[in-house]
Amino acid sequence: MRKLVLVFVLVVASVAPATALGSIDRAGPPLADAGLDQSVTNGTTVFLDGSGSRAPDGRLVGYEWRIETPSGGSVTPHDGSAARTSFVPREIGRYAVTLTVTDDDGETATDTLYVDVERSKRATTSRPTTAPPSTPPGGTTPPTGPPSTPSTTTPSAPTSTAPTRSPTVRGPRLVTGDRPLTGMYAVTASGAVSSVEWFVDGETVSNGSEFSTSWTPGDHTLRAAVTYSDGATEMATFEDGTTGVVADPRPQPSLSDVGTDGGLTGRASATDEYGNLQSVEVSIEDIRTERRSGSLGTGGTAAFDWTDLEPGREYEVVVTAVDSRGQTATVNRTVVPTAPPEVISAEFVDGPVDSYHPEIDPGRYTAHHVLQVDLNGHSIEEFDIDLWAQKPESVHQVVERSIEVSDGTVTIHSFWAGDTPSTGSPYSVVHQLSLRGSGPTEWVNSGTSNFAVTPSDPVIRLRMRNDGARPVGGDNSSAGGPVDFRETVIIDASDSFDPDGSDLTYIWRNGASATNRDEAIGRLSGWENGKLIVEDGTGARAYQNWSAQQTYVPSVHRTEVIGNGPYHPDETVQIRVRTQRVQFRRNTADIEIDAEVRGARGSVVEWTELRTADENSFAFEGTLELPASALAANGPNATVVLYNADRPGYAEETTSLPTVELTDAPRVQRGTLRVDDRRYVIRELTSETTVADTRAEMRQLRNGDYEVVDSTTETTGYRIEKRVQTQEEIIDRDTEAFDSSYHRRLYLDTHPEWTADGTEIERRRVANHHTEWKRSPSGGYTGDTRRVLVDPAEYVVEREYEYTTSEPRTRERSSYQCIPGVGCYEVTYDETVYVSVRHTYWAQSKQLSHHSATGSVRRTLVDAAEYATEYRHEYTTWSTVTERRYVASHTTVVQPARYEWRTHTTVSNGRTAKRIAKGDSDRRLGETVTDRQWTMERTSVGTVVRPAYTTEDVVVETRATVSGSVIRYRSDDSGLKTARVVEEFSTEFVSRGALDEAAIKERVRETEGER
């Protein structure tokens, strides 16, 4: 029997693509696809889609969109780290949108699209299109596409892959800008998530699938623990497996210690909470700049001191701070430099003055100092003003200073006195003004003013210890005897003084002489007129005349009623009054004594001086008239008062008048009284005034009993002094130049013998060479060319897809068959087998749903890039460069210059003088030419009539008109009393002293005998 042997051979055929459209690198960087260019209308939302980007050998972990505006600025999209986002353009022109993608190996790729924003045209968005796949008939025919070469494979069982869960954190890993540094984070995970717990720097901070926080500056870690519904927990990190978050705020600049006096000073500072400050710069427009740069860490300061600025002009100061990430912050301030205040004048406006003494007129010893300052826009509150005497042991301030501010000028008045005459040199008062808080360029001005104290005249102070009168007997009684002015009058002048402090010499003249005990105590007879001369150590004198007779009042020797009573109450009674006899040695004595009635209505009808037989002896006698009712025993206390007419009110003698008997008659008295037209005779000092134009004339008038009551100083001219050089100065000068005032100041701080010496300015023309690329070789073509991209190439991204089909194959087979007993022979036949064939093709999307991607991706050129040739041109411009150098100098004086202030001219106007002195530093205000006058006054006592008075002691008498009715009261035999108005009356009332209305009425009733 022949045996048939069948042998099956499995043939595997691989199908390769017929044509290759691009190379495939399965281990390269990712492919970024930002999408196609777009054209939109301004204000229309632009949608961006980068989901077409791929990572051939892994997965994408990050997207970053950057949008540049037509003006060079930037726009932040809605979500700059998402695959799909959007933004709204606000400018006309072309926006450049760049997408950067990062894969899980950390490699990146970028792609840029352009958005043209038009003013009115509707936006047209172009998106990539995918052709619909062609469907093969019967389900086994290969799809239309690149042909493939089949390969036969042995079918294998399908492989099952379990899904993986890889939770990731999405959100910014670098947070910058202004605080708060806010970040939004979310977890992306596959599978059913039951809870998410967030950890910052190892501490639990929140729960939930999303998390928002405000970061503190610094480096942080962020993780999320994701728990699934099956109980499994995984830790989520960022897509690249990292957990770090950097919070870097923008630096904070500031401007402090700004001083504007005479320039501009201050400190520009910046702080950086992350510690990566790179530079701090302060500039004033395009004039000055100070900069500090480098790794400044958390803070830096740039100091500035700019002195050559225009006062009154507004300047813009800008402080700029930049960190290492390029974050920039600025602060601006408008400042106005001011000129320092200027002293206009500082001088004493009067003088010379007398020495200080508390008992003389302050106008004699007070020196008035006036300091005037032009504020130049400052306020008085910015000043410290100090005034002090160079010799405080001899000079002091007598009253508090006063300050006046008017029209931008401050005037300080101060008043000084010297204790003793300023011999040799005048007294000096120093003024110093400083401006508070003015920093390194603090303004201070000081100066010295002088005043002279001349020797003062002595001052006389007298006390009379007695009046020099004594009784000498006669006329039957000592009381009625004569008074003889032979008693010595004692005058004490020991209270006199010299304001200058020198010892006094007392010179007694006329009838006065010094006592043996003390030359300051004098004596003279009462009938003499004395004179005292007091002389001080410089020979200056004071004079005083006096007479004791002006204060003497004799006593009443006798009063008697003329006639016999009894008297009717309304009847007038006369009383004779006589004084003691006064006796003098010489007939030059003169005493005038007057009398008046007080306490009742009455008058002095006669008053004369009686000469007696004795030489130089006399008395006074007079007749008084009063109603009898005023002299009744139960009537008023009627008195007669004697006084010296030369000094009324100074000394008085009062004597009661005798009483008389009244008849028994009907009683008459005044009813209701009215007091009208009340007046007072007031003792008033009258003065005789004259003016002394010289000090000698003033002293002469003092000797004539005049006193200084006022003094005025009138400025008649102002001397302008000119500074004249009398010897030339020879100096040796060394200089150093610095590129900034700050460096010069550092040098000066360590070299105190050097001083700032202005600036040097050098100007030179500089050639500036420029290059520019143009499309044409004409002009300044240099021969250099370059190829530039005009229109970038356009690509489409294609992916490789695969599918498998089962196809029949026919082949010829041979076999040996053996038949037992016969033998073996070969048999040939055809055999049909089915093989599995793999097909692949490249397309932008798969053509049938059961096709699968192989993972290979390629970019296929659609439109080639366009390039143009540009030609390099050169041209030159010229500019002027100004370099300022700050100079410090050191001078050695070989021969000092000598100057003197000499009188140059005299002007009459003070403002003109100040303007001349202010406008020229070689001129100054010198002495003030003054004309001083003294107002002298000699006083005497007089009287005036006024409706009111201030004090009772100056009232001599009271006058008024008193009116009313006269009532008569009768009593009949039965005792019945009747009253009847018999008349109306009006009388003029006169009485010594000050009386009010009630007292006047009482005094009138007393004159009628009423109690």
Image (cartoon, rainbow, N blue to C red):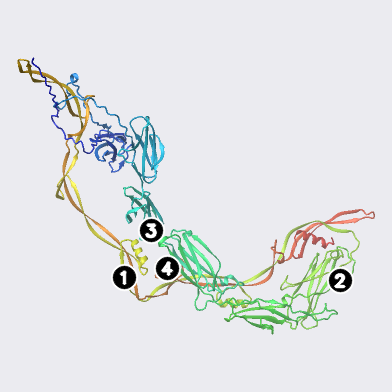
Say which label, 2 or 4, has the lower sequence index. Answer: 2
Which mark identifies residue 734?
Answer: 1
Say which label, 2 or 1, has the lower sequence index. Answer: 2
Front-most of residues 723 and 519: 519
Crowd class of label 4 (few under 14; some 14 to 19; many from 20; radius 10 Å): many
Q: Which of marks 2 and 1 is in front?
A: 1
**Residue 99 in sight in this render:** no
Say which label, 4 or 3, has the lower sequence index. Answer: 3
Say which label, 3 or 2, has the lower sequence index. Answer: 3
Identified at 86% across, 58% down, the residue is 668
Q: Look at the picture and state if 906 lies above or below 107.
A: below
Where residue 13 sits, quadrant-wise, is top left
Which mark identifies residue 917?
Answer: 4
Identified at 22% across, 39% down, the residue is 29
Q: Nearer the viewer, mark 4 or mark 1?
A: 1
Q: In this view, does 772 lie to the left or right of 48?
A: left
Q: Distance between the residues labelled 4 and 1?
A: 33 Å
Q: How far apart are marks 3 and 2 (CA)?
A: 105 Å
Q: Quadrant of the N terminus?
A: top left
Crowd class of label 3 (few under 14; some 14 to 19; many from 20; radius 10 Å): many
Where does residue 833 sit, x and y in percent of width and height? 14, 20
Q: Dot 2 corresponds to which residue?
A: 562
Say which label, 4 or 1, has the lower sequence index. Answer: 1
Which mark identifies residue 264?
Answer: 3
Q: Residue furthest bottom?
A: 516
Q: Is mark 3 on a helix, strand or loop?
A: strand
Q: Quadrant of the C terminus?
A: bottom right
Amino acid at dot 1: Asp
Q: Which of marks 2 and 4 is in front?
A: 4
Q: Look at the picture and state if 339 lies above or below 218.
A: below
